[in-house]
Amino acid sequence: MKKEIVYAFIDSQNLNLSVLNEIKNIKTEKTIYQGWKLDFKRFFIYLKQKYNVDKAFLFIGRKPEYESLYKSLKNWGFHIIFKPTLDHAGKTKGNVDAELVLHSMIEFENYNKAIIISGDGDFHCLIEYLEKENKLFRILVPNEFSYSSLLRKFNRKIAFVSRLKSKLEFTKK
């Protein structure tokens, strides 16, 4: 039997911020999730070992001051797809949604199964299409307490990165 080729398509900002940010109950103001810093190197290894990922495409906004981070991400094995960023009202914007969808279609014939890593409902149409084509392997939602309700119909394919703190948290060496 031929090995299935698995590609991961990662919304880096959604992943990073959703794991990092604390979440409070709106009514009680009590913390229901304490954020933590994701170790991207360990995350890449996790994807390879747990899901046999052949290629992991990381979609990220590009800023000159982070060139050393990009170099590290490449060295760890990620295929980086950059989105130019814009500064607007003191905030940096670099929405990667269109690039992620486009590249998952450009690569469509090269993989048997796809893992989408995001909790963003904007990927609903892509996930639905991959499911219809029998190419959706898994959705790794960064945070179980904060993700689009549009993804809930795919519950049987969802796993939560937020539950993997003991395996994937960045710790200073």
Image: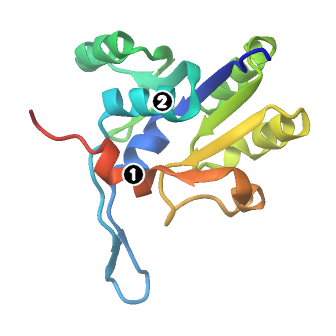
Q: Earlier in the sequence, mark 1 or mark 2?
A: 2
Please name the residue that numbered disc 2 is placed on.
Answer: 49
Residue with the most extreme front position: 1
For badge 2, the amino acid type reads: Gln
Q: Residue 2 location in percent, x, y?
A: 77, 14
Instruction: Give SS at disc 2.
Output: helix
At 48% from the left and 29% from the top, the residue drawn is 49
Q: Secondary structure at mark 1?
A: helix
Mark 1 and mark 2: Cα distance apart in space: 14 Å
- Near-viewer residue (21 or 143): 143
Relative placement, left or right, of 139 versus 165 is right
Left or right, residue 99 beside residue 39? right
Q: Which residue is mark 1?
A: 164
Q: Quadrant of residue 34?
A: bottom left
The tag on residue 132 is none
- Crowding around mark 1 (Cα neighbors within 10 Å: few <14, some 14 to 19, many 20+) is some
Q: Amino acid at mark 1?
A: Leu
Task: Classify 10 Å Cα crowding around label 2: few (below 14), some (14-19), many (20 and above).
Answer: few
Relative vertical location of residue 108 with respect to residue 120 in this rendering, above or below? above
Q: Quadrant of the C terminus?
A: top left
Q: Is residue 27 above or below residue 138?
A: below
Q: Nearer the viewer, mark 1 or mark 2?
A: 2
